[in-house]
Image (cartoon, helix red, strand yellow):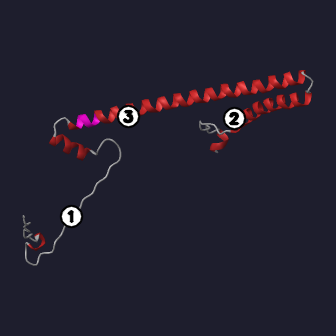
Amino acid sequence: MSRKKTLPVKNVLESKAGARPSSVVTSATFQGPIPPPSILQGYETIIPGAAERILVMAEKQQQHDHSIQKIMIEKHHGDFRRGQYCAAVVVLALIAAGAFIAHLGQPIIGGILCATGLASIVTAFLAKSKRPSAQPQTNTISQRQ
């Protein structure tokens, strides 16, 4: 059976008689992939070439971010186009079904189907024209005065 020994711990704070303990805490933060020049110089001092490696890493990360954004924009555009094609097929099917049903002798039901298809087209165009534009408007002479 083994016994654990407890070793006496020196009290570091009492190393000098009557001295008060003090500590200094320094904190610095920065935002972004590249540290401030003073920190970058510190890396370069410790590891020669580290600053260049950090800058190359930041450039590669930026290229990666841009490529991801480009892919996302292209996918969003493709989804938008597919939605437009599907909506066009549905609207054309409503109008064709309405015309066919009207031809079979049910003009009211056929008219309702055709009107529904046409109303959806008109609503889509009106909703698009009411959206705010993505580009800012330029100042005209009357607005500057």
- Using the image, tell me which numbered label, if any, was put on residue 128: 2
User: Disc 1 residue type?
Assistant: Val
- Secondary structure state at the residue bearing disc 3: helix
Q: Report, in whole angstroms, how far the alpha carbon at label 3 lies from the one at label 2.
A: 34 Å
Q: Nearer the viewer, residue 2 or 112?
A: 2
Q: Is residue 113 magenta?
A: no
Residue 4 as seen in the image, left or right of residue 104:
left
Q: Residue at x 57, y 28 (%)?
A: 77
According to the image, label 3 marks what residue?
62
User: Disc 3 residue type?
Assistant: Gln
* Residue 8 lies in quadrant: bottom left
Mark 2 / mark 1, whichever is N-terminal: 1
Q: Residue at x 16, y 72 (%)?
A: 21
Say few, some or many: other residues with alpha carbon within 10 Å of mark 3 (under 14 / 14 to 19 / 20 or more). few
* Residue 97 lies in quadrant: top right
Looking at the image, the residue that sits furthest to the front is 1
User: Disc 2 residue type?
Assistant: Lys
